[in-house]
Amino acid sequence: MTLTDEVRSFNRFYTREIGLLNRRLPATDLSLPEARVLYELAHAPETGRTAAEIGRALGMDKAHLSRIVARFRARGLMQSRVSADHGKHRLLTLTDVGQKAFAAAEAAARAQVDALLTPIGEGGRERLAEAMRDIRAALNGREAAEGNLSLRPLQPGDVGWIIHRQTVLYHQEYGWDWTYEGLASRILGAFVAEFDPAREDGWVAERSGSIVGSIFLMKSDDPAAAKLRLLYVEPSARGLGLGRTLVATCIGRARELGYRELTLWTNDVLVAARRIYQAAGFRLISEAPHHSFGHDLIGQTWTLDLG
């Protein structure tokens, strides 16, 4: 099944589940377009919004919107006044009757969704919320994807998730097989088992509660040298400078801990990551071919002088 088929199949499923095939929303006499316009008016500034602004926000046909506005005015749900800043603009606001209609519609809509979610456990709800955020990010583009990016310390469950996600992404993007999971598990297993807060650290990048990247600073046999390990960024968060931020955070922490050198090992196919390392000042000092994860690769060692 192609992605187009998957999207259409999901649309058919979801429109049925939430009743979009019905002419009216549950417990109201509003059509879906009318309910969306009512929502925009209810969340407008106190001064109101113009019909053109609402049309742009909803991507709605001008004639269709005009008919809805006329119906709202006739039913006493909406009022308008001339803008003090622009004599040709009319600002639309809800009347008291309109506010009550919106409150009833909002309560009905929330009750409908609550009923849909009631059988779903907490874990399923978290997965559902994360999937919806990812869909918005993918379809809305850069602005939605950026969201509220932040870095935080490691929490329970992070390490297993990071191993899983890196393995899945490298399989999807480079065709690496499941044996990569063994490497990531050994590296992070040792990091957890022998963690030294005076010499090591780790960061998880989050957006709206979802993990979108990570990086680790690890000790080495040389007290003066640290290792940068397992940088990864989710596809939905790429292009936002997150990789550079993670690398810069790791470098800054290495300096704080008194390291004089930071090294890393990567593979030549990880082009985007290599560009980040190079821009941060890392130098390629050696490379060698190897066969790993089902592929012939070229491993590379890079180093950064922290002095």
Image (spheres, rainbow, N blue to C red):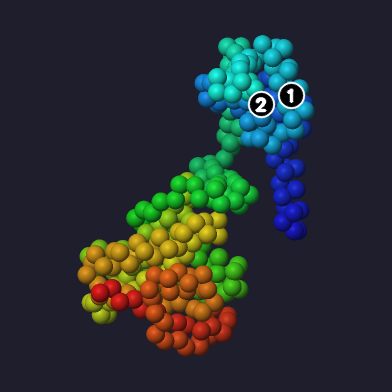
Q: Is residue 202 above or below residue 76?
A: below
> Helix, strand or loop at disc 2?
helix
Residue at 60% x, 67% y is 172
The answer for how far apart the CA atoms under marks 2 and 1 are is 8 Å
Q: Nearer the viewer, residue 17 or 228?
A: 228
Residue at 74% x, 24% y is 66
Residue 305: percent from the left, percent from the top? 30, 77
| Drawn side of residue 17 relative to residue 87, left or right | right
Q: Is residue 193 above or below residue 26?
A: below
The N terminus sits in image quarter: bottom right
Q: Nearer the viewer, residue 64 or 202?
A: 64
Q: Quadrant of residue 37?
A: top right
Q: Which mark is residue 51?
A: 2
Mark 1 burial class by Cα count in 10 Å: few <14, some 14-19, many 20+: some
| Drawn side of residue 207 relative to residue 78, left or right | left
* In the image, farthest residue toward the bottom: 288
Q: Are marks 2 and 1 in contact (CB under 8 Å)?
A: yes
Question: Residue flagged by tag 2: what amino acid is it?
Answer: Ala
* Residue matched to label 1: 66
Q: Is residue 156 above or below residue 170?
A: above
Q: Nearer the viewer, residue 37 or 279?
A: 279
